[in-house]
Amino acid sequence: KVVVGFPTVIGLNFESNIVPKLNFLQEELDLSDGDLRDRVVSNPILLGYSLEKRYRPRLKACRAAGVDDMIVLYRISKTNISFCESIGAPHNCCATE
């Protein structure tokens, strides 16, 4: 199901790209194995977003804004500005350097 939903996943390096994302999501968002699996199977594009440029900055912004960490997953496809607005943070809240 993941390959059908996000064929590009075939080109991602499992050890250096996919595993770190899965570990980060599971550890930082406190997801069980089953929860993580269900989220990735239902929305495989989650594997395509950058850990350093998308996930980490947005999680940091959520925590700074005092909002639920899970918003990182629910609003992953939003632009940075739209994401920041949606959590009530400044427009550059998740900008990377």
Image: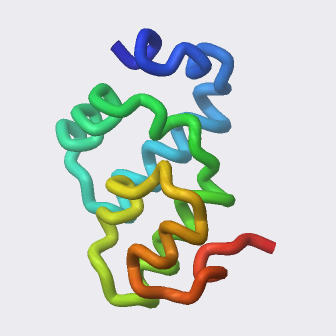
Q: For the point 40% across and 53% down, which residue is it?
A: 25
Q: For the point 59% across and 58% down, which residue is it?
A: 54
Q: Residue furthest right?
A: 97
Q: Quarter-wise, where is residue 88 in the image?
A: bottom left
State how the image is colored.
rainbow
User: How many numbered callouts?
Assistant: 0
From the top left corner, tell me how far across and down residue 90 is, in percent. 56, 88
Q: Quarter-wise, where is residue 15 in the image?
A: top right
From the top left corner, tell me how far across and down residue 17 is, in percent. 63, 37
Question: Please, is residue 49 above or below residue 9 in the view?
Answer: below
Question: Please, is residue 66 above or below residue 20 in the view?
Answer: below
Q: Is residue 44 left or right of residue 49?
A: left
From the top left corner, tell me how far across and down residue 60 is, in percent. 51, 78
The N terminus - image quarter: top left
From the top left corner, tell me how far across and down residue 57 is, in percent. 59, 70
Q: Is residue 59 left or right of residue 37?
A: right
Q: Is residue 55 left or right of residue 36?
A: right
Q: For the point 24% across and 40% down, which residue is it?
A: 33
Q: For the point 81% across and 73% down, which residue is it?
A: 97
- From the viewer's side, name the closer residue of 17 and 9: 9
Q: Quarter-wise, where is residue 68 in the image?
A: bottom left
Question: Please, is residue 79 above or below residue 93 in the view?
Answer: above
Question: Please, is residue 19 above or below residue 93 in the view?
Answer: above
